[in-house]
Amino acid sequence: MSQNLLLGPTCQSCGVALIDKGDFGTNTAGAIVTDYCKFCFVKGEFVDPDITLEEMIVKSTAAIGKKKGINAGKAEAMAERILPGLDRWKAKH
């Protein structure tokens, strides 16, 4: 689980902050998985197993913009900077 001392744990697929129990993904038994969020990982599997890093950047841009209150260009730049360093994408780049 990646943990930023200021932000706490983040999903290692999309970068969303994992704050409450309900934010975390689950394993095959339904227990919390601390590395991924509920939007990316359910019942031990990625929700979208074939998504590419580039597709995840596009998918994450709107959510980042809305959450941070920034325009799409800044949100995309943030996603391009953060996502490649997450565990799911490190091995692929």
Image: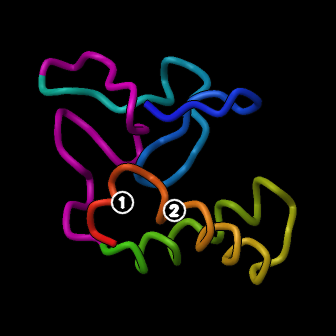
**Which residue in the protein does label 2 denote?**
83
Q: In the image, 82: left or right of 74?
A: left
Q: In the image, 65: left or right of 26?
A: right
**Which residue in the protein does label 1 denote?**
90
Sequence-first tag of 2 and 1:
2
| Residue found at the very far left of the displayed protein | 28
Specify few, some or many for label 1: CA neighbours under 10 Å numbering under 14, 14-19, or 20 or more: few
Up-down relation of residue 47 to residue 71 (above or below)? above
The quarter of the rendered structure image containing the C terminus is bottom left
Give, as a single range, the part of the protein colored magenta: 29-51
Up-down relation of residue 58 to residue 17 (above or below)? below
Percent coordinates x, y for residue 5 in the rendering: 70, 27
The residue at the point 43 percent across, 30 percent down is 1
The residue at the point 62 percent across, 68 percent down is 81
Judged from the image, the secondary structure of the residue bearing numbered disc 1 is helix
Q: Amino acid at mark 1?
A: Lys
Q: Amino acid at mark 2?
A: Leu
Label 2, label 1: how many angstroms apart (C-alpha)? 9 Å
